[in-house]
Image (cartoon, rainbow, N blue to C red):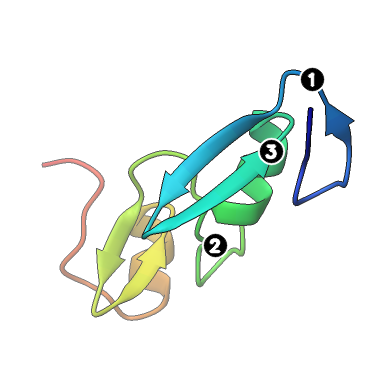
Amino acid sequence: MATCETCGNDYYMSFEVHAHGAVHIFDCFECAIQAMAPVCEHCRCRIIGHGMEADGRFFCCAHCAQSEGAMSLVDHA
């Protein structure tokens, strides 16, 4: 068994996520998302899908990006 680094639960079905040379242990996807998903710089939601990036800043959608001045990003063409 291994302990989730987000909630501290010691769970027999915990899993590892390998990212950027580090190993993280979680007991569920919810905890993994809370620990690892980037946050939209405008609305502060967790970016679970592809999201958008402009000048090193992350956004959940083009609306949020445009609200922060990244006018070149669009959700669809």
Residue ID for mark 1? 12
CA separation, marks 3 and 1?
A: 11 Å
| Residue at figure coordinates x 59%, y 63% from the top left | 43
Direction from residue 72 to residue 31 in the image, left or right: right
Image x and y of residue 64, in percent: 43, 63
Q: Nearer the viewer, residue 8 or 48?
A: 8
Height in image: 20 above or below 70? above
Considering only order in the chain, which callout, 3 or 2, is on the residue closer to the N terminus?
Answer: 3
Q: Residues within 10 Å of mark 1 (few under 14, many from 20)?
A: few
Q: CA distance from mark 2 to mark 1?
A: 29 Å
The mark lying in front, picked from 2 and 1, is 1
Which residue is drawn at the image coordinates 72% and 18% (left, top)?
13
Q: Residue at x 21, y 54 (%)?
A: 74
Q: Which residue is mark 2?
A: 39
According to the image, label 3 marks what residue? Answer: 26
Kindly state the secondary structure of the residue where label 2 is placed. Answer: loop
Amino acid type at circle 3 is Phe
Mark 2 vs mark 3, CA separation in Å: 19 Å
Mark nearer the viewer, 3 or 1 = 1
Left or right of residue 71: residue 4:
right
Q: Is residue 31 left or right of residue 77?
A: right
Q: Nearer the viewer, residue 3 or 29?
A: 3
Quarter of the picture containing the C terminus is: top left
* Residue type, label 1: Tyr
Using the rendered image of the protein, determine whether residue 46 is visible from the camera's viewpoint. no
